[in-house]
Image (cartoon, grey):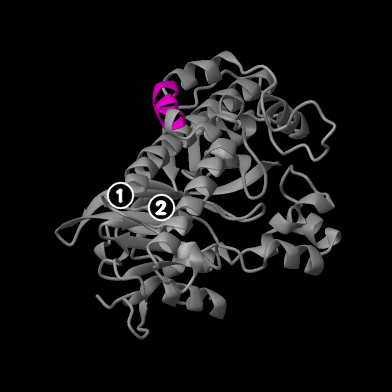
């Protein structure tokens, strides 16, 4: 079998293996990858997914294997961001003829968005009074969070409990989808919310200060890192572990409320745990590859070990995929986390008209206002080309098409 990737070899850096055949790659992303590859603790090579695009420090859509060091900005500030999907016992014909009441019910059940007015009493994307499901989920997080905040008190002044079970903004979403057999799926995308953002930013700044203190020069300050064995390394590993647990619980609470909301609108009784997947795509973990124990940072990438289930969403108007990993060692058992942006948010708002957005999402019950143009389908790469470029990384199990989409 021939390799399905291309290799970039820069000066004084690890090789960069690119699963990007047939999809556009920004030259700035290649430059950013080469800076990351020059770090002395990169293990073997970087693995680059077809959804790759410029990020902070490192590109989104890259798998960064490291020995004895972690780069906080590579993990990012949306620690543990990922996807959850659940197949229901419903089929398309069980749904109401008009889907707007279903969308409204979901919007009421799951706090989303963010209040822009300073005069508002609270963030509309947070709970006013956390529901019972949130309180119960927090019990499994509280003790470890207290250990972290005892050492870093500033992290107590974050949206933590009140964000557990909430969606957020940007590319985060809740969807109702149909698969190739017209079965109904619920799918959502979110991470560790305000508290994860605060943890990420705090430790990114600590890493930068450590680099200055040790007189370590880097090609980009956002590649500042913690060497294993240092105080901040151990503290970061615990904090990021907690944020990843929070993100997983966040999606579980949201899914529970999503199902409850749907049951208020859909007359037919149904189950929603037929086939469930809950996976991160912004995280760091310890794994064994090529016979060695290393750290793997997936910055916009999903674990695709042999048999592992994952989710690769398209944009608001494109298909999404439930996939099974093929366990390709060259990609460090990884695949893409979505289609990947081809336009920045600012560029999309300038180039895409509201009429074009409405036409692109005509088949989906969703927002069709100027506030979501930065998430319009044409702002993203062609998801089918992305899937073709990684056919040696995953196999498609289910193909989903959106019929309802809730955006923050």
Residues at marks 1 and 2, CA–CA distance in whole angstroms:
28 Å
Within 10 Å of disc 1 (Cα), the crowding (few <14, some 14-19, many 20+) is few
Check the image and name the residue furthest to the bottom: 11
Magenta residues, start to end: 142-149
- The residue sitting at 49% across, 26% down in the picture is 272
Q: Nearer the viewer, residue 387 or 180?
A: 387
- Percent across and percent down for residue 155 are 53, 34
Helix, strand, or loop for circle 2?
strand
In the image, is 41 to the left or to the right of 315? left
Q: Which residue is mark 2?
A: 302
Please identify the quadrant where the N terminus is shown: bottom left
Dots 1, 2 in contact, CB < 8 A: no
Whether the magenta-drawn stretch holds residue 145 is answered as yes
- The residue sitting at 49% across, 70% down in the picture is 220
Dividing the picture into quadrants, the one containing residue 147 is top left
Whether the magenta-drawn stretch holds residue 135 is answered as no
Q: Which residue is mark 1?
A: 230
Within 10 Å of disc 2 (Cα), the crowding (few <14, some 14-19, many 20+) is many
- Percent across and percent down for residue 208 are 47, 58
Give the label, 1 or 2, closer to the camera: 1
Residue 146 in the image: above or below residue 387: above
Q: Mark 1 or mark 2, which has the lower sequence index?
A: 1
Please identify the quadrant where the C terminus is shown: top right
Check the image and name the residue furthest to the left: 291
């Amino acid at each position: 079998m021939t390799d399905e990737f291309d290799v970039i070899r820069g000066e004084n850096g690890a090789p960069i293996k690119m699963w990007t055949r047939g999809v556009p790659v920004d030259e700035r992303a290649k430059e950013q990858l080469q800076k990351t590859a020059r770090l002395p603790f990169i293990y073997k090579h970087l693995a680059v997914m077809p959804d790759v695009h410029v990020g902070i420090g490192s590109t989104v859509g890259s798998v960064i294997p490291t020995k004895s060091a972690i780069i906080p900005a590579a993990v990012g500030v949306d620690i543990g961001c990922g996807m959850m999907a659940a197949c229901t016992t419903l089929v398309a014909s069980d749904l109401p003829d008009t889907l707007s009441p279903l969308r409204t019910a979901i919007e009421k059940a799951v706090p989303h968005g963010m209040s822009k007015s300073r005069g508002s009493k609270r963030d509309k994307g947070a709970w006013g009074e956390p529901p019972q499901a949130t309180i119960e989920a927090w019990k499994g997080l509280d003790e470890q969070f207290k250990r972290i905040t005892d050492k870093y008190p500033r992290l107590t002044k974050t949206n933590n409990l009140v964000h557990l079970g909430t969606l957020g903004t940007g590319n985060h979403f809740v969807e109702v989808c149909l698969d190739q057999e017209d079965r109904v799926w619920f799918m959502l995308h979110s991470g560790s919310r305000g508290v994860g953002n605060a943890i990420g930013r705090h430790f990114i700044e600590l890493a930068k200060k450590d680099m200055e203190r040790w007189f370590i020069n880097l090609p980009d300050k956002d590649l500042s890192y913690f060497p294993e064995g240092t105080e901040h390394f151990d503290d970061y590993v615990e904090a990021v572990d907690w944020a990843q647990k929070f993100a997983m619980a966040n999606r579980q609470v949201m899914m529970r409320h999503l199902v409850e909301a749907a049951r208020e609108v859909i007359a037919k009784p149904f189950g929603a745990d037929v086939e469930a997947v809950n996976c991160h795509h912004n995280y760091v973990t310890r794994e064994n590859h090529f016979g060695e124990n290393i750290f793997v940072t997936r910055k916009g990438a999903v674990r695709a070990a042999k048999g592992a289930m994952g989710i690769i969403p398209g944009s608001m108007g494109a298909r999404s995929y439930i996939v099974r990993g093929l366990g390709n060692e060259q990609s460090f058992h990884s695949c893409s986390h979505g289609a990947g942006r081809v336009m920045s948010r600012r560029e999309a708002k300038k180039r895409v008209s509201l009429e074009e957005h409405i036409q692109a999402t005509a088949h989906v019950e969703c927002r069709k206002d100027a506030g979501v143009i930065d998430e319009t389908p044409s702002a993203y790469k062609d998801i089918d080309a992305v899937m073709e470029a990684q056919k040696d990384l995953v196999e498609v199990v289910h193909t989903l098409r959106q019929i309802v989409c809730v955006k923050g």
